[in-house]
Structures are given as structure tokens and as C-alpha cells.
Amino acid sequence: MNKHRLELFSDSVFAIVLTLLVLDLHVPAAHGGAAFSEIVPPLLVHAASFLVVASLWMAHHGVLARVTE
């Protein structure tokens, strides 16, 4: 497997992981301030998870930049 194919495969895996994170979000049933207070904790968790996965993705690209074919 050459470097380009490995990079495309890993990008696909990271894209699937990031998509699965978003699929868990739901619209709250309440309206107004109650809905906002209901959705803030899950949004913060998803934002933190997104940042962790995105930082791992960037680190992986850094590692692959050093790989020679």
C-alpha cells in the first residue's frame, strides 16, 4: 500500500468518526430557555470530542508527512 492510499483511507476513517459524532445530536422537545439549557451540555461534549478527534487527525497527517514511499 502506498502512502497516498494510506492517507486517503485514514482520512475516510476520520471523516466517518466525525460524522458519527454529529448523528447523536437531537433537537430538544422544549422551547426557549429550557431547550437551550437542555442542549448545551451535549453540545459541549460533542465539541470537545470533535476537537480531540480533529487534533488526532492533524497529528496523523504530521506523521504521514514524514513517511517516504
Image: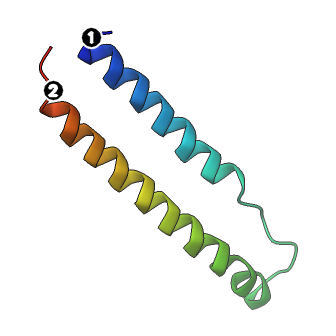
> Amino acid under label 2?
Val
- Residue 60, how many percent across, how many down? 29, 41
- Residue 25, how many percent across, how many down? 71, 60
Tell me the residue that label 2 is attached to. 67
Judged left or right of residue 22, residue 47 is left
Residue in view at x 64 percent, y 45 percent: 20
Residue in view at x 25 percent, y 17 percent: 3
Tell me the residue that label 1 is attached to. 2
Residue 29 in which image quadrant: bottom right
Residue 69 lies, with reference to residue 23, above or below; the image says above
Residues at circles 2 and 1 in contact by the CB criterion of under 8 Å? no
Q: CA distance from mark 2 to mark 1?
A: 10 Å
Judged left or right of residue 58, residue 26 is right
| Label 2: which secondary element | loop
Residue in view at x 12 percent, y 32 percent: 66
Residue 58 lies, with reference to residue 68, above or below; the image says below
Screen quadrant of the C terminus: top left
As drawn, which residue projects farthest toward the bottom?
33
Screen quadrant of the N terminus: top left
Relative depth, front residue between 67 and 39: 67
Relative depth, front residue between 62 and 35: 62
